[in-house]
């Protein structure tokens, strides 16, 4: 207890989760910790949901990104979540969003706190933050994610802290909490390498803002990453061949440039592929650190990884937490505003690897909307990285749903990333290097290299007929979505 | 002459335009000065086009942005331009691009030089730069634009300088040439206010790289900005009312935050509207400085304007150039990489005002492709600004082509700016404040406030029926482009 709450005066504020949850009232804006299912407060939201079963209430829920422990499901099913931002990945909440029951504000992950500070979004009434410990000065030491926790705690009127003693005290020192000076007097953000330390190891707030403390003991939800399969290995190999070529052309050296990799199985497989690659002394400046980050550290390939969260499978989590001191010098967790900041991403010159649901023959990418309408998760940080990276890569398998869907389509049914922000596309069939190419040139290479053989000739046929209509970006508007419509009608594109 | 070429040794390199143009050979990559029809070298490209009439040749032509003096037309018609980047605005070149005869690489204006430095685009063989003068050290003092001239001159093997003595020598000191350190060792870009001076007043290159000097005397092409009409005045008034409300809400003070305004009649009208507004001590951090910038300075409303070019009407140009010393303390021209840099745009917290061709009921914006296929000009700097601004505003009239076209459509036929990057939409009918709203909420307010009465009920009907299909962003894929198709078939949406 002394270790976990070092400010003695604060120990009086320990209450039950239900008592803390009672501070949250109908109509409030609540900012919670949690990013890619890591580091979320759990006891208070569960108590809130419990209360809502008998005494309904609705809140605006802001987080870093997705929550673990089915919290988004439980809060959606108890109809607590009326508005949600800036990201989610839960099937039940997704259903409610797509039914128009929950208003979801899908945002670039670096932007939420800017809009809060300038009061373009309403400030949180309450922040609920999971912590490893509270320092003597009342500073909050986060756990496995930082996300938006620091700004929520700073901007909220009251803060509820969940001290989770399942997390080792040695987490202290892993976080780097930096809040940019407020505009219009902002100074440069001084991150110049992935390991630049620019802030404090805790979230600084006046201790009197801490309205309640809840003691918990829980592990993060385990990530369920599919292990590499034939296709994801092929994607990884295409990309590694390409990067080797970049090194040969003198565009970067064998240490590459810092890497960002999105969440999910393909990105994980690509990073895994680097273990056997000729590259060394790699660095990551990313959002989420997955199993592969730690495997690369173990393999002696990765010297440093900066992120906003750590999301691990059960097996990796067990192994790494036991031996955390060994990994700690190689790690830093930052607020998502900093991990994803356009200023820093552009400065460091990243290779950004993110996953597409579908892309079109001109290189526009849809990361979010199935059939142009149904929200999957959200744009997340992909736009922060893709727009500002040195090399913006999107990966996907060439088909989905057992081959019924081509991931390469005539026109994407929703655009998250325009052709301007997409340099390289990779599927298991091949890689398209789009740099310096006009749309008509992009189309030929995307169809040839990235489309599944089942759909290649239909795509080529669409493109050829579209060219007869003319234009910088030839299309046949009557047919642009005919593949999607056919899928809905026949179950196959 | 002494004044214009202060390095005596360089005076030997004065040649005719035809002799200088002879340095440019078939297949070369040529980087030319010029941005929004300001500051382009003219004599050498004209001589090149003349030669091409008898001795055909093809080049890749890179510039800052659009060229004046019909150069893009002449170079397209003589088939000199095989590839063109990163922006253009000429009807003849546009025709060739849309016919697939010229490969056009449409880029964010801040990005071209990054791709050149990392050799992701081929370096220019030759740079052709218009200058006011050459300093004793061989530094090149630009004229009415900086654009990409500095990086072209630094990266090219040879440089041709056109000294244009129609420009006053007092231009010296107006430019601020800063080249970021190359990645991976880049330091922050130290611009912290619109008037931060961080570089040199000239482009520093070793004098031996100057292969030829051509003496010219010419004025910039005059901008033909339509004067404010009833609709553009209404757009300006809606926006000014909104900004007054922002001030009242305490989100900014009466000096607002630095302004960026795109080129064109509407943006110009909006800035004009500020002359009679309650705001004062305004600052601009923009790309192009138009007539309205100078009118605001004259009115004592604008204290400082940073841009990458000055593009004036004939009348304004005459008046301002005569009295240039009066305006000079209020002006700075920067490389477009810096005027548009995501790092600086985000840091300064701009109000970015750009023009849309069309937008959809969810707030996605098309700035470039008529009917989703025909390139108009290019994305220009709109993405650099809209993604990173504190407040991203898009303006357009609610109808085009005399009322045959609704600028508000069910789904844009091409996406340049996704809903994530669009805060405020304005037409003459009203303003939609989209901040913090989910797509279904955005649709209702966009249809109500921004659509022309002729199309409002059809848009509402589309939206209502789309909601029956469901989804976070409801659409009927069968009908999403039916308005565009109807326009093609019947001449009216
Ligand atoms: C795009 C994204 C959904 C892919 O997720 P993933 O887990 O890597 O990839 P999967 O192949 O498992 O696809 C996820 C689901 O989409 C489905 N899917 C994939 N492509 C599809 C397509 N073209 N059409 C319809 N459904 C498709 C899959 O079948 C799967 O469905 P299931 O969950 O019912 O099995 C995910 O990367 C994402 O949300 N991206 C946006 C946010 C982001 O990029 N953040 C980056 C920084 S972390
Ligand atoms: C969008 C853009 C073309 C508007 O230009 P503008 O000169 O302000 O606006 P106009 O209303 O005169 O429109 C230009 C043309 O597009 C046509 N147009 C406008 N809306 C249209 C629509 N929805 N469908 C078809 N045509 C349309 C107009 O009729 C006009 O045609 P014309 O030249 O044959 O008369 C211009 O702002 C642009 O190129 N933007 C992209 C680059 C950018 O934003 N840069 C910002 C930093 S400078």
Image (cartoon, coloured by chain):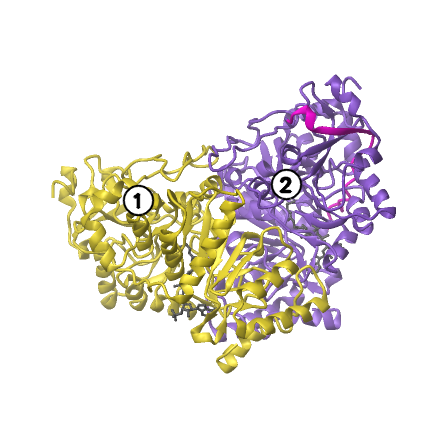
Chain colours: A yellow, B purple
Whole-percent x and y of residue B369?
Answer: 66, 58
B62 left or right of B260 in image: right
Neighbourhood count class around disc 1 (C-alpha, 10 Å): few under 14, some 14–19, many 20 upward:
many
Q: Give left or right: position of B338 versus A9.
A: right
Residue A135 lies, in percent from the top left, at 20, 38
Q: Quadrant of residue A6?
A: top left
Residue B308 in view in this figure = no
Magenta stretch: give its range: B205-229
**Residue A473 seen anywhere in this rendered image of the structure:** yes
> Which disc number belongs to residue B123?
2
- Residue A149: horizontal and vertical position, in percent? 32, 47
Residue at the outermost right position = B54
Name the residue nearer the viewer: B135 or A9: B135
Tell me if residue B443 is in the magenta stretch: no
Quarter of the image where the C terminus of chain B is located: bottom right
Per the rendering, the mark at residue A153 is 1
Do marks 2 and 1 both belong to one polypeptide chain? no
Dominant secondary-structure state across the stretch colored magenta: loop
Residue B228 counted in the magenta span: yes
């Amino acid at each position: 207890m002394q270790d976990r709450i070092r400010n003695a005066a604060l120990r009086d504020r320990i209450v039950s989760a239900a008592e803390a949850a009672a501070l949250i009232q109908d109509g409030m804006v609540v900012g919670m910790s949690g990013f890619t299912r890591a580091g979320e407060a759990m006891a208070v939201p569960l108590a809130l949901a419990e209360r809502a079963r008998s005494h309904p209430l609705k809140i605006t829920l802001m987080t870093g990104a997705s929550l673990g422990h089915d919290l988004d499901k439980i809060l959606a099913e108890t109809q607590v979540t009326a508005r949600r931002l800036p990201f989610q990945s839960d099937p039940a909440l997704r259903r409610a969003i797509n039914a128009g029951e929950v208003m979801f504000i899908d945002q670039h992950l670096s932007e939420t706190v800017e809009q809060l500070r300038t009061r373009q979004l309403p400030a949180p009434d309450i922040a609920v933050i999971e912590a490893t410990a509270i320092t003597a000065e009342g500073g909050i030491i986060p756990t496995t994610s930082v996300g938006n926790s620091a700004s929520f705690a700073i901007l909220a009127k009251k803060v509820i802290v969940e001290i989770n003693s399942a997390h080792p005290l040695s987490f202290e020192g892993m976080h780097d909490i930096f809040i940019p000076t407020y505009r219009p007097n902002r100074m440069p953000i001084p991150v110049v390498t992935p390991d630049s330390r620019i802030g404090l190891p805790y979230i600084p707030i006046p201790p009197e803002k801490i309205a309640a403390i809840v003691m918990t003991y829980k592990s993060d939800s385990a990530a369920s990453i599919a292990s590499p399969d034939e296709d994801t290995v092929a994607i990884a190999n295409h990309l590694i061949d390409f990067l080797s070529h970049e090194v040969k052309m003198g565009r970067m050296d064998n240490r590459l440039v810092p890497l960002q990799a999105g969440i999910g199985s393909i990105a994980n497989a690509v990073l895994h592929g680097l273990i056997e690659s000729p590259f060394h002394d790699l660095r990551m400046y990313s959002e989420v650190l997955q199993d592969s980050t730690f495997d690369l550290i173990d393999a002696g390939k990765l010297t440093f990884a900066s992120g906003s969260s750590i999301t691990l499978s059960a097996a990796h989590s067990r192994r790494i937490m036991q031996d955390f001191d060994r990994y700690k010098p190689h790690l830093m967790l930052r607020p998502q505003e900093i991990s994803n900041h356009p200023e820093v991403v552009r400065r460091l010159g990243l290779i950004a690897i993110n996953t597409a649901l579908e892309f079109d023959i001109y290189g526009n990418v849809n990361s979010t909307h199935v059939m142009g309408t149904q929200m999957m998760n959200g744009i997340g940080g992909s736009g922060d990285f893709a727009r500002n990276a040195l090399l913006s890569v999107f990966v996907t398998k060439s088909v989905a749903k057992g081959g019924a869907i081509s991931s390469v389509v005539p026109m994407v049914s929703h655009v998250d990333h325009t052709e301007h922000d997409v340099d390289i596309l990779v599927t298991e069939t091949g890689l398209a290097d789009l740099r310096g190419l006009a749309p008509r040139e992009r189309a030929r290479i995307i169809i040839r290299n990235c489309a599944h053989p089942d759909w290649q000739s239909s795509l080529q046929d669409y493109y050829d007929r579209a060219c007869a209509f003319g234009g910088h970006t030839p299309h046949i508007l009557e047919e642009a979505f005919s593949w999607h419509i056919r899928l809905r009608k026949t179950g196959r594109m």
